[in-house]
Image (cartoon, rainbow, N blue to C red):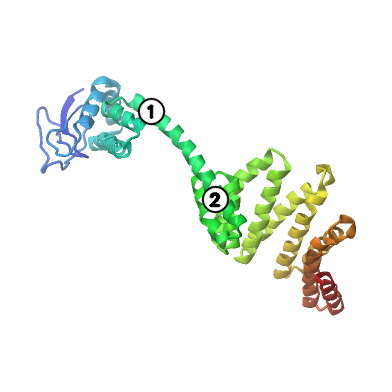
Amino acid sequence: MRRLLVFMLLCGSCIAQAKPAATVEQKSSAGCSPNFSNISGSVTIKFEGQACIGIDPLAVQKMNQLLALAPKMEKRLNELLDKKDKELAAKVAEAADYAEKYQDLLKRLQQQAGDDELRKSAFSLLEQNKLDEAAKVLDQILARDEKQVDRIAADNFARGRAADLQFRPDQALPFYAKAFQYRPENTDYGWAYGLALQNENQHDKAVQTYAAILPGLRERAKGGGAVPSRELSSILNNLGILYSLTQRLQGAEASYTESLGIRRQLADPAHGNPAAYLPYVAGTLNNLGILYSDTQRMKEAEASYTESLKIRRQLADPEHGNPAAYLPDVAQTLNNLGNLYSDTQRMKEAEASYKESLKSYR
């Protein structure tokens, strides 16, 4: 097979072209501007950077070392050219891209070095083309910086909590945002940030934040335990509220329904403390009743309100020790039932619900 000898000048994509003739050499028409033609057959490549200003000699040296020390690269290139008849320019572009990346990394490490001994070491090793050693030092830098990011995220979250405790939710919001930005996989940070956004009526951002942490919450809930399941049900319930406010009613129903299913499980006597979760069951039932009523599904709305009211009456019973804490919830559901009865022209039932609601508030 005929073998072509092609001399190329490395400058981004600058090369000299070789024609498929015995000993013909063609120069580029302008400095570092490529002229290419399809070339087939075996190719030997040599990189010379002297003719292109601004190219790091180390990058050129590196490419020549790779070709000299790794003949398999040349063999593979010839195989590709023979098999697919690819333009040599494509392969040269890959080599030029490699050199540009190498030079860019050198520049970045040099800029970041400062007084950081590890970064200085990585830069020095890269300058010497000791890529394996440089990569190991960069791994050390990553491990160190990861710990710093954890600390910064935790500090921002703590500062947000402090603002919350000062009843300054608007001041808490930016700190929660930073904590979540640094560690978006942390569901505690996302939960706090989403709730802060919701309370500040930034509905779309709150929905995005809740949706971002849902996969992590679902994964945690799979492991069992009441706390992850409770958090998941709370996020789903809040999503239902936000979807309702933004008229995404199908999403609202799906979120409420999933939340209700989880809360029913938590309130099951098998969990040991059903009373702790019954208020959440009643709350989601009430929300579903509102949704059904808004979408003219009056039978389903009435069923949800009725079940919610039954639970809330139980919780407000004096035997529970603190009926006053639940009476406003009883009054709320009674008022919602009154609205439903009024909308369906059941005026006597509406009047009775409204009157009982008033008594509960008093």
> Is residue 138 depicted above or below 191 in this figure?
above
Viewer-closest of 52 and 297: 52
Q: Amino acid at mark 2?
A: Arg
Viewer-closest of 111 and 344: 111
Compared across the picture, whether 68 is left or right of 343 comes to left
Identity of the residue drawn at 22% across and 30% down: 58
Q: Tell which residue pokes out farthest to the right in this image.
A: 319
- Mark 1 vs mark 2: in front: 2
1 or 2: tag closer to the N-terminus: 1
Q: Position of residue 84 (x, y in %)?
A: 30, 33
Disc 2 element = helix
Q: Gap between marks 1 and 2, in whole Å?
A: 33 Å
Counting the numbered discs, the total is: 2
Q: Amino acid at mark 1?
A: Val
> Is residue 47 depicted above or below 158 in this figure?
above
Quarter location, residue 85: top left
